[in-house]
Amino acid sequence: MDLRALRYFVHVAEVRSFSKAAVQLRVAQPALSRQVRKLEDELGVELLERTGHPIALTEAGTLLLQRAHFLMREVSQAADDVRSHGADLVGSATLGVSPATCEVLGPIMTRECAKSYPKLRLNFIEGFSSFIFERLVDQELTLCILHNPPRHPGVEIEPLLSEPMYLVGPGDQTPALHRAHAKMALEALPLILPNRTHSLRMLIDRTLAGRRIDVAFQVDGYTLTKALVAAGQGYTILPYSSIQQQVETKQTSFARESRASSQRESGVASCIRRRRPVTAAGGTGSADQSGIGRCPLGSTRREQRVDTQ
């Protein structure tokens, strides 16, 4: 199968237009059409329905598009692997980050990678931890940085840091609720938390050990959660890295809850796909150690010198 023809087909299938794909690829439209037709002749099936506008994929075309994305990634990865054996690490790496980690760790990672690997281009995808982890398992990402990632036989997890969790409340300018302070009882507070399958919620439930709480709003998003807290709609529990900007601008307040506070910490880890599957005996093949497999942040416990307000 001609890789150029396959790449041309992917572009046409994604934009549903030969003319738009030709502009993106900077090739003449007749040449583009010939390449796609050549691919169809080689496979012996119609991949596109050309009569409508926009054009549509046939069943065979849909299947090929799904497989083509994987094939193109593998080809790109193979090229990057070969280049990495040279003097410098070159190519691109796609990193997945959650909203809770990207604000603090994103700038650090780009700075350190630019310093250590100037020829390596970083691409970022932001999303919920479960979404990012699934994309890593499906081989759509090179590496991801997540809070409390689940164990998976095809993923190598390296702890990076551990940071305490704080009770987060409204700031000075919000009279609806009191500011967060250490003596508050969680059972008496209207809480804004994610659903029970969220890694943060599971961590909170484990440390509360059966204590009844009032979940006023169930929100699976940090942006909305912090906005509701700042507006005086309730309290939440988050690591300081997630609320640093809001604390500095006095939109929110925070405090360590006195009970079980020492056990409630959120771990941040890097996750990378293993290169070989787990064997029947439980052993694993070596993971990618070409440079991006080990996060430049190193492994550490985050000791935060902040004053609870």
Image (cartoon, helix red, strand yellow):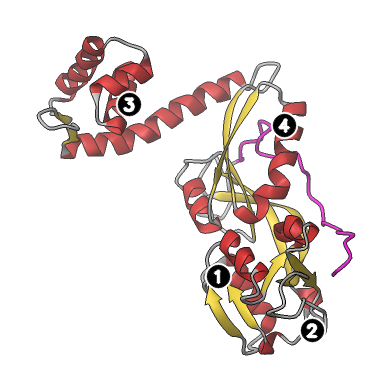
- Which residue carries the number 1 mark? 194
For disc 4, the neighbor class at 10 Å (few under 14, some 14 to 19, many from 20) is some
Q: Amino acid at mark 4?
A: Cys
Direction from residue 279 to residue 109 in the image, left or right: right
Lower position in the chain sequence, tag 1 or tag 3: 3
Labels 2 & 4 near each other (Cβ < 8 A): no
For disc 1, the neighbor class at 10 Å (few under 14, some 14 to 19, many from 20) is many
Q: Is residue 295 visible?
A: no
Frontmost of labels 4 and 1 is 1
Q: Amino acid at mark 2?
A: Arg
- Which residue carries the number 4 mark? 113
Numbered disc 1: secondary structure: loop
Residue 11: image quadrant is top left
Lower position in the chain sequence, tag 4 or tag 1: 4
- Which residue carries the number 2 mark? 259
Using the numbered discs, state the Cα–Cα distance from disc 3 to disc 2 in whole angstroms. 56 Å
Judged by its main secondary structure, the magenta piece is: loop
**From which residue to which does the magenta span run?**
286-309
Spot occupied by residue 217 in the image (x, y as percentages of width and height): 54, 76
Q: Residue at x 82, y 56 (%)?
A: 302
Q: Is residue 163 visible?
A: yes
